[in-house]
Amino acid sequence: MILGKVIGTVWSTKKDENLVGSKLLIVKQLGLDFKEKENFVVAVDSVGAGEGEIVLVATGSSARQTNSTKNRPVDAVVMAIVDKLDISSN
Amino acid sequence: MILGKVIGTVWSTKKDENLVGSKLLIVKQLGLDFKEKENFVVAVDSVGAGEGEIVLVATGSSARQTNSTKNRPVDAVVMAIVDKLDISSN
Amino acid sequence: MILGKVIGTVWSTKKDENLVGSKLLIVKQLGLDFKEKENFVVAVDSVGAGEGEIVLVATGSSARQTNSTKNRPVDAVVMAIVDKLDISSN
Amino acid sequence: MILGKVIGTVWSTKKDENLVGSKLLIVKQLGLDFKEKENFVVAVDSVGAGEGEIVLVATGSSARQTNSTKNRPVDAVVMAIVDKLDISSN
Amino acid sequence: MILGKVIGTVWSTKKDENLVGSKLLIVKQLGLDFKEKENFVVAVDSVGAGEGEIVLVATGSSARQTNSTKNRPVDAVVMAIVDKLDISSN
């Protein structure tokens, strides 16, 4: 999964009918030091993530394994909100 | 999903029989400032997107989850037209 | 899908039994100006593409959605021959 | 598969219900000389890997082929702990 | 598929139970001039490839379409040994 930060949302009226009601989050990729990278991805929310939150994003067919995304044409889902990272000191 | 802009179409007479009738869009990847990047992808249209429109593209097996793409050999689909992006100021 | 140009073929005697009879094409990735990029992919032919032709390549599980590739261990298929690109002038 | 080194874990209380009990490892990608690269991935543990261990990570839908990950929204799994690499001298 | 060269093997005692007996090959990516690139992938052997041999590697879910890899958590398989490349002169 990718480590990222929710920085906004995408508004879309005209979209695949199965996506009505889905929240489309803009997620910037983060380094382990929480610095934002250039890359971003648009991901469907499945855990109630809000702006500013650190999250994990699953991509590909795995993005369709949540109740909010099953059988939908989405290739990225926010499936966890991160509390903290534990990184070994050596 | 990838943020992109429809900049043209691909014409193809000789293609997989399941693709007859599909519209093949050329989509340039965009940054959050709507600046075009070098990368582009050819994606099947599923929402009636036209040239100049800002769209989302789903890739991989997720691209086959629309009525226009089911069981077809396509790995990218335009599944939403973007109205606007809401990006937090901090 | 990726825009590419067929520049050759791969010969292989010892391969997965399901691939016997499949033509393995070497496809160089192209820019929108038809300039060849450094990247290339080896893809199974499903439309009778020959050397020098401009094609589209579908990758991942989508590459297995043609009659020539179903259930086979291939992750790239040539599924269309390109007649021309229509790119908007603005 | 990717060669990597477990350098930490991700703590997450609010996550997809199917992920409760899964251990989320932070895995840095390694070169063949075991030098850490910049890239990292968050992967579910399926073999009891601990910090500092050299592992293999499978990504995409293949990450869901273990008992710990079946039908879950995860796109990366640690599926082997590496004892050693045998690299030919020529 | 990726063009590569087998340069070694990975030894692993502790791995997913479905992988017992699988040979894990280290494959360096090659250019069309057979020069080794920096990238490498660890792939399961399905055709009896040995060190020094030029091979094709299929990745993603396609890597699970051989008898040696079905339903296993592997995302790369060596599915062909390359005899030669035929590249057009123009």
Image: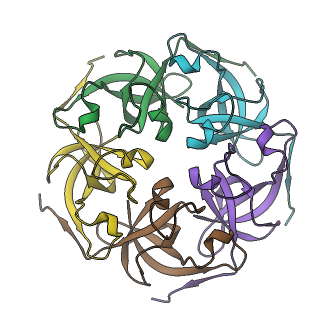
Chain colours: A brown, B purple, C cyan, D yellow, E green
Relative image position of residue C3 (x, y in whole percent): 71, 43
Relative image position of residue B61 (x, y in whole percent): 57, 50
In the depicted structure, whether residue B21 falls above or below residue D13: above
The picture quadrant where one finds residue C77 is top right
Relative image position of residue E22 (x, y in whole percent): 30, 26
The picture quadrant where one finds residue A22 is bottom right
Q: Residue at x 17, y 49 (%)?
A: D49
Name the one closer to the observer, D7 or E34: D7
Q: Quadrant location of the N terminus of chain A? A: bottom left
Residue B84 in sight from this viewpoint? yes
- Extreme residue toward the bottom, this view: B89
Residue C81 in sight from this viewpoint? no
Number of disc labels: 0
Q: Quadrant location of the C terminus of chain A? A: bottom left
- Extreme residue toward the left, this view: A90
Q: Residue at x 28, y 32 (%)?
A: E19
Name the one closer to the observer, C5 or E74: E74
The reply, left or right, for residue A10 in relation to residue B6 is: left
In the depicted structure, whether residue B15 falls above or below residue A85: above
In the depicted structure, whether residue E84 falls above or below residue C46: above
Relative image position of residue A67 (x, y in whole percent): 47, 68
Q: Residue at x 48, y 40 (%)?
A: E61
Name the one closer to the observer, E88 or A9: A9
